[in-house]
Amino acid sequence: MWPAFLIYQEVLYLKKIVVIGGGAAGLMAAISAADHGGQVVLVEKMASIGRKLAITGKGRCNITNSCDVKTMIEHIPGNGSFLYGAFYAFSNEDMIRFVESLDVPTKVERGGRVFPVSDEAKDVVQAFYCALLERKVKLMTNYRVQSIVTEESQVKAVTTNHGDVLADAVILATGGASYPGTGSSGDGYEMARSLGHTIVELKPSLIPFETDEEWIGDLQGLSLKNVRATLIVNGKKIAEEFGEMLFTHFGLSGPIILSLSHAAGKWLDVKQKVTAEVIVEINLKPALTAEVLDKRLQRDFEKFSRKQLKNALGELLPAKIIPIIIDLSYIDGDKFVHQLTKEERLRLLDQIMHFTLNVKGTRPLAEAIVTAGGVATREIDPKTMQSKFISGLFFAGEVIDIDGFTGGYNLQAAFSTGFVAGRASVE
C-alpha cells in the first residue's frame, strides 16, 4: 500500500499553504499538502511548471532509483544522512507507485535507474500538472516572490510582484542555482538568508571538467563505456568511478565524470577553478590486469606485424583516441609493429591503463546538474523540513544543502523532502 495521501479525497481546507517553486520538490510538496487537507497555492516565476524536471535524464526523466534506502543514502554524499526520515516517509517505491497511479508506467534500467516507459519527461510533468488540478491547487505562474513576510517568527504571507498572498505556512522549494533558464537561479537562498538562515557556500555538483590538454578537441564526441576514472589531487587518489564518460571540446563529461566532480568541489574557488593539482586518470581497459593486457597487445602485434602502429590498434581502442595514445607513448605512429621494442610496447600499455588529463576547473555553476550548498541542514528539522527559526517555514529539494550522484538520487531527495514538507505544513 502507498501512503493514503495518494488517494485523493475531498477534504475541508484547514490551512493555507503557499509553495514557492514549481520544480520536482515544489510539485510534490503541493500535492502532499493538498492531500493532507491544505488549501494550496503554488507560485512559480516561470510561465510553466516543471521546466527543469522536463530536461532531466536527457529529456527522459530519471524519476528515482530502485535501490534500498541505505544505498540511496550512500549515493548522496552531500548530507545524505539528513534524509533518512524523509526516505522512509516517502520512499522510492512510494514514488514509483505514485507516478504509476497517474497513468505513467515505469521501467528499471542499468544501475537501478527508473524511467517512464515512454522515455518522455514531459509525460511526468503533465501527470503532475493533472494531479495539481485534480486537487484544486491554485497555480500562479509568472509570479515572482520577492520576500516571505513574518511576524514574531511566524510566517504570515509572501510578497510577489503582483501583491501579497496570505499564508499559514510557506514551503520554499526554489531549487538550486543551476540551469537558470528553467527558473533555478538561486532566489530561495536570499529569501532564507533574509530570515536568518545560514547558506552553505554554493558550488557545482555533477558538472563537467575543463582540462588543459590542447588536443582535447580532437576527441570531442568520443563516448567510452566500461572505463574507470580516478580523481587524483596532489598525488593522492580521492575517488574513482566505473562506467561511461564523454570527451567534449572543453574537457570531460558523462556519468562517471559528473560523479567525480562532487569530490573535486572542495578544491574549487569561487570561479570554479581548481586550487590544487587535480588529475583525472582513465583506465581504458579496467577489466584486464597489466599482464593480461600485455599478452593481448602481443597477440595483436603478432597479428598485425606488417602494419604501421597507427593502423594496428583498431581492435583494442576507438579510432579517435589511437593517435593521442601513441603520441603520449612517445612512439612514431608510422613505425611498423614488428619494429617496436618491448620498452615501447610497455609505454603503450601504461598509457592505455593510465591515460591522464589535467583538470583546470569545472564548467560554470549555471551549467551544473545539481548545486552543492544551500540552507544548512542543522537549521532544519529533518522530521518535518520546518525551519528551526521560523514557525510555518518549510524547505524542500535542492534549496537545502543536499546533493547526490547521478542515477535518480537527487530527484528522489526532492520528492521525499517535498512530501514531508507538504504533510508537515498542514499538520
Image: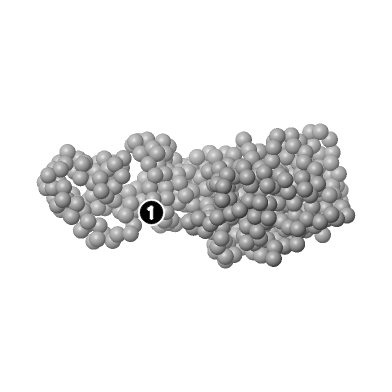
x, y percent for residue 141? 74, 37
**SS assignment at label 1:** strand
- The quarter of the rendered structure image containing the N terminus is bottom right
Residue 415 in view in this figure? no
Q: Is residue 255 above or below residue 182?
A: below
User: In the image, 302: left or right of 202?
Assistant: left
- Residue at position x 51%, y 45% from top? 207
Q: Which residue is mark 1?
A: 226
- Residue at position x 61%, y 50% from top? 373
x, y percent for residue 45? 72, 37
- Residue at position x 77%, y 38% from top? 140
x, y percent for residue 50? 66, 42
Q: Nearer the viewer, residue 38 or 425?
A: 38
Residue 131 in view in this figure? yes
Which amino acid type is marked by label 1?
Asn
> Dot 1: few (<14), some (14–19), or many (≥20) neighbours within 10 Å?
some
- The quarter of the rendered structure image containing the C terminus is bottom right
Way the structure is coloured = one colour
Q: Quadrant of residue 47?
A: top right
Q: Nearer the viewer, residue 321 or 374?
A: 321
Q: Quadrant of residue 138?
A: top right
x, y percent for residue 97? 65, 59
- Residue at position x 86%, y 44% from top? 166
User: In the image, 11: left or right of 261?
Assistant: right
Q: Nearer the viewer, residue 333 or 130?
A: 130
Q: How many marks?
A: 1
